[in-house]
Image (cartoon, rainbow, N blue to C red):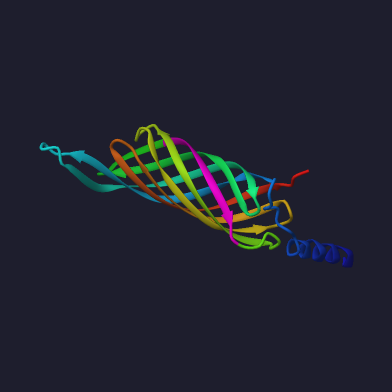
Amino acid sequence: MKTIKFLLFITLFSFFTVNAQITKGNWMVGGNASFSYSKTESKNNNSNGTEITYSGIGGYTILLEPNVAYFIKNKLAVGSSINYVNSFIEENKLRFDGMNLGISPFVRYYFLDYDKNYNVFLEPSYNHFISENLGNSNGFGLKTGLAFFLNSSVAFETVLKYSKNNSENYINNNIYLGFGLQVHLEKE
C-alpha cells in the first residue's frame, strides 16, 4: 500500500514539474470542443435599396475544431483548424438543424515563459464556412484560453472564442466556451 501511495505521489508531482514544449521547431496537434449560443441577424433590402437588418434568430451550436500548428518562434505557432459546426437554430418558432464545415488558418501566441506548467494564449483566425442553411460565409475568430501542461507533451485547455461570419444574407455572431487537448511534438 505504501508503494502505491508513493507512486501516486510521484505521478502527481510530475504533473507540476514539467516543461512545456512551445519552442521553435515543435508541432502542436489536437483540438477543441465548444458549445455556444448564437444570434444571427437577417439582412434584407427594402424597395428603395436601403439595407434593413432584422434580429431574432437564435440557436445553440456545438463546434469541433481539430487543428495542427508549427512553432515558427518560441511561444508563436501558425496553423489551421478544420471546423465542424452542428447548429440548432430557431426563428419565429421554426427550427433548423444544420451542419457547417469550415477551415480556419490561425496564429497562436503564448504569453508566459515556456518553462511553466500553465500558460495563457491568444489565437486570432480567419474563417471560411460552407453551410447547409446559411450558404458560404467568411469572417474572423478570436480565441483565448488557459493551457495546463499535464506533462512535457500534453496540454489540457479551457477556451473562450468569439467569431463573426458574414454571408450574403446573414451576419452570425458566436461566443463559444469549450475545452481542448493539445499534443506538443518535440523536435528531433
Identify the residue at horizontal 42%, vertical 45% (top origin): 140
Outermost residue toward the left in this view: 48
| Horizontal relation, residue 98 to residue 70: left or right | left
Identify the residue at horizontal 54%, vertical 47% (top origin): 107
Tell me residue 26's x, y (percent): 69, 46
| Horizontal relation, residue 87 to residue 3: left or right | left
Identify the residue at horizontal 47%, vertical 36% (top origin): 102
Identify the residue at horizontal 63%, vertical 54% (top origin): 75
Figure quadrant of the C terminus? top right
Classify 49 as above or below 160: above
| Horizontal relation, residue 109 to residue 172: left or right | right
Tell me residue 148's x, y (percent): 64, 59
Q: Nearer the viewer, residue 159 or 48?
A: 48
| Horizontal relation, residue 163 to residue 74: left or right | left
Which range of residues does the magenta coloring cover?
99-111
Q: Nearer the viewer, residue 104 or 54?
A: 104
Tell me residue 62's x, y (percent): 47, 45
